[in-house]
Image: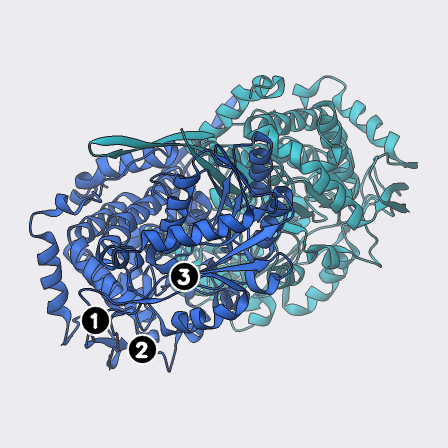
Chain colours: A cyan, B blue
Amino acid sequence: MSHPLFEKHKETLTKAVAAIEARGYWSPYPENPRAYGEHATEDGRAAFEAYRNAQFYLDQPGMIDRVGAEISPYGLPLNITYPRCHPDALIAAAKAAMPNWIKAGPDVRAGVCLEILARLNACSMEMAHAVMHTTGQALMMAFQAAGPHAQDRGLEAVAYAWREMKHVPESAIWEKPQGKNPPLRMEKRFTIMPRGVALNIACSTFPTWNSYPGLFASLVTGNPVIVKAHPAVILPLAIAVAVARKVLKEAGFDANLVSLLVDEAASPVAKEVATQPDIRLIDYTGGPAFGNWLEKNAQQAAVFTEKAGVNCIVIDSIDDYKGMLRNLAFTLSLYSGQMCTTPQTMFVSSEGVATPEGVVSAEQFGKDLAFAVSKFLEDPARAVEVLGAIQSTATEARIERARELGTVLRDSSAIEHPHWPGACVHTPLLLKVALSDERAYMEEHFGPIAFVVEAPSTSASLATAERVIREQGAITFSVYTTNPGVLQMAEEASLRAGVALSINLTSGVFVNQSSGFSDFHATGANPAANACLTDSAFVAGRFFVVQSRRHI
Amino acid sequence: MSHPLFEKHKETLTKAVAAIEARGYWSPYPENPRAYGEHATEDGRAAFEAYRNAQFYLDQPGMIDRVGAEISPYGLPLNITYPRCHPDALIAAAKAAMPNWIKAGPDVRAGVCLEILARLNACSMEMAHAVMHTTGQALMMAFQAAGPHAQDRGLEAVAYAWREMKHVPESAIWEKPQGKNPPLRMEKRFTIMPRGVALNIACSTFPTWNSYPGLFASLVTGNPVIVKAHPAVILPLAIAVAVARKVLKEAGFDANLVSLLVDEAASPVAKEVATQPDIRLIDYTGGPAFGNWLEKNAQQAAVFTEKAGVNCIVIDSIDDYKGMLRNLAFTLSLYSGQMCTTPQTMFVSSEGVATPEGVVSAEQFGKDLAFAVSKFLEDPARAVEVLGAIQSTATEARIERARELGTVLRDSSAIEHPHWPGACVHTPLLLKVALSDERAYMEEHFGPIAFVVEAPSTSASLATAERVIREQGAITFSVYTTNPGVLQMAEEASLRAGVALSINLTSGVFVNQSSGFSDFHATGANPAANACLTDSAFVAGRFFVVQSRRHI
């Protein structure tokens, strides 16, 4: 079945499929704001401002009332309300929307999904402001991460799912020889059937980047999606849902294939909705406690979780010590450590760090790193563009408490934002703890909190890091070494622990960055996530193949 | 990495991948016994006889003692003992065997798996006798189903898994432009990592056909497999495991990548082993009770189940009434209904069955079908070749009890086997029950027990069949109709219920037959199975992708 939207986006889709198989650098969505027009930033700001102090319009069924209490981490009250709809009504509407969406088939659905992504791309700067003023990300990061980079991940999921669906022919002629008798001949038809209504539970720090993979993987395989926003970070997903609904409607489909579910912090609904028999798919990003609960209790659904863990770095030796320090200072500062990829625990050997300039003692490394972070954040105007703001008061409180966990190498301090006097900005806290103090460094402390742990040897560093990752989970693992033997040990540890390894990052790539179409995000092999967000297993279970056969 | 076994089997593998995408008729394993040599049947029998009254040799670790109490459903005591090994020892040995198997990579593993399948193919007739004298299948069926057809399904799983693994490149160069500055360049390496030790829990009726998909899907993706045989049907899997171990060893790998776990009916071990933390994959075929238990309780593992259900037929109208009756008579008789694909409940409208010769009343249809079955089984020598023997005394008892469930249209009777005086052969029991008597026809009665249910209309037949399938699960659904409107309704019902539909089978294809590389077996979309045994979702979750990246 040909369709204008499929024709329109076919080339992009074909390139995306090639990209997931080549896994080099590729993106159809420019990450340079200039590509979006001269006035993009201001237009985006204006669009964002238009949402403020108003009712967000979404024509959804089962509306109970309007809720919304978002306050920007930069101090701005958003004063936006969203329709709170009864989950049963959203589920019923989603189910009613399915038959035509199923009939449309993989190509049309992919065309519609790519059109949604194209429209989301066009409003990337509007999204940037919305994400900035809910998550606390600095504007440029919000633009890239919630705009083009999130769209990359959405397109990547569509590409994976479309490739899987297209592996199944629509029909086949089966002709079995019968010796001298005429062959048996049958026509077989194969239909891609979705699993059912999907619930997409978003997080408060990367609402689009972490939700788009599941959202688009489910939608393109025929499943309607109910997007459950975090009560503190609704606007970005409200915008995304509104765009999706508009495109669906324009293309002649039922807008209720994508809907927004909101609740209030005081009366959360996710648990109850997640265990409804009609919810057959769940994508979740957030803390491990609720993620583990979902895996255990939402047995009627296929559950994909990205939780969290304790990302580790092992520092053995390096040929560019200053480059390493600069790289680490940026990595620890970026969005104040509020990334599922930010390293928390750094292991260094008592034998010190070998560099071309001689061995740097473990103690000195701690001091050097503390100094590098402080230097990097010296200029508040520059610092806030990297640090962003703290999304949640829980994270602020966590910084307070963490000071007790070890010796302070570098204290966290509040920074006054040059443009946003009410902004909640804190520099990273760097602590030194003993190897024996597992209680401190083996537990996740989400936010700008990192530990330097001295181990008796690099082998001990690697062994401990591997154990931390296997037990607590991790999305990233990083090693600095010039020693081929150590590198091999690190590679083997990363394979055993099922964690992505970054080696000797000293320049413009940071361990907490994951590149669309190239880096696999999470693995599913350690407790940080039960799925990789960017592989075949993430999409294959979202649909079934139902066949018919008849003689011809 | 090139490897002689990969080179040897590359062409077959390439053709298998083409076959799963075309889904026409294809097989590399001939189903005609003549292709296996003039003396194949006798040689197979001799090989089978050599196992009898002896100790089956398997050089496995952790041996406790020897057990084995198989008695052929044809009356022959096998008197074979197998090493009973401690599960912990098998798990430990499996884990120790993994590193080299992982390093071998997808191509080498696929080559080894295809060599195992080729060796299994060569001993198909030996397997046939082993399967006949454990499952009760007649020799020719045992040969085809447990030999080439099972090998087809094993190869199909290898093809799916290999294709998925090969979609991931071994390495990539990522080069991101940086405006006027030199690009960022990284080398990324991607390693396929297995999930962990797999437990393959086999059934008593199709030990190889139902186990090979999971076994080979796990093995080729790098996971060691512990095959847990049903205590009454060990020999076929012992043979398969011995072949796999021999090939692995010859190829330089650890034989403990595939091992056999046996227990006794009085002291089953599956539950305990299935919940071991080190068991990370479970494939199960068997009754729904234990299947559901595994899905609920073995949460540390990815669990793939093929349970059972109530397969349905809706009879509306047909242009070849006699052909339909002949087809149904064979279908109901084949292996005495001991197939997960055998229909159990047939719905016919009170308005009768429209045929070119006029309308046949519902009552008459019941009589005609009863007569057709009796006529088909008239000659005992021919009958036993279709019926085989009853595998389990529980099934015999079920036939006894089932008589009470409705009006007997055709009674089950014992047949004396011309060659095996001790054989347990029973013809099918055909009952008529009322539409209101759901207790009877909505529950699975495994074995040669079928129901004719009169519904007020074909619409009512379809609606009830759909409800049965959605609630109880089904692997097959069949419709007879010449009415395009009814056909469309049936097709839509089959899609909604997630069950494969066979339309108007009146000649040499039977609803209980599933053709390798063409028919998808089960869907995962209804309670009969949580997975399709022959799709991407069945393989994709068996491995992870773990990457490393470094600047170049």
Instruction: Identify which residue, B471 or A511, lies in the foreground.
Output: B471
The dot on residue B163 is: none
Q: Quadrant of residue A219?
A: top right
Q: Residue at x 51, y 49 (%)?
A: B364
Query: Is A387 positioned to the left or the right of B15 in the image?
Result: right
Q: Residue at x 83, y 27 (%)?
A: A47
Q: Secondary structure at mark 2?
A: loop
Q: Is residue A287 above or below residue B355?
A: below
Q: Is residue B473 above or below residue B393?
A: above
Q: Earlier in the sequence, mark 2 or mark 1?
A: 2
- Chain under numbered label 1: B
Q: Amino acid at mark 1?
A: Pro
Residue pointed to by mark 2: B86
Query: Is A235 positioned to the left or the right of B408 in the image?
Result: right
Q: Earlier in the sequence, mark 2 or mark 3?
A: 2
- Badge 3: how crowded within 10 Å, few (<14), some, or many (20+)? many
Is label 2 on the same chain as label 1?
A: yes
Q: Secondary structure at mark 1?
A: loop
Query: Is A138 positioned to the left or the right of B106 in the image?
Result: right
Instruction: Identify which residue, B14 or A393, lies in the foreground.
Output: B14
The image position of residue B53, as x and y in percent, is 14, 76
Residue pointed to by mark 3: B448
Instruction: Identify which residue, B151 or A439, lies in the foreground.
Output: B151
Q: Secondary structure at mark 3?
A: loop
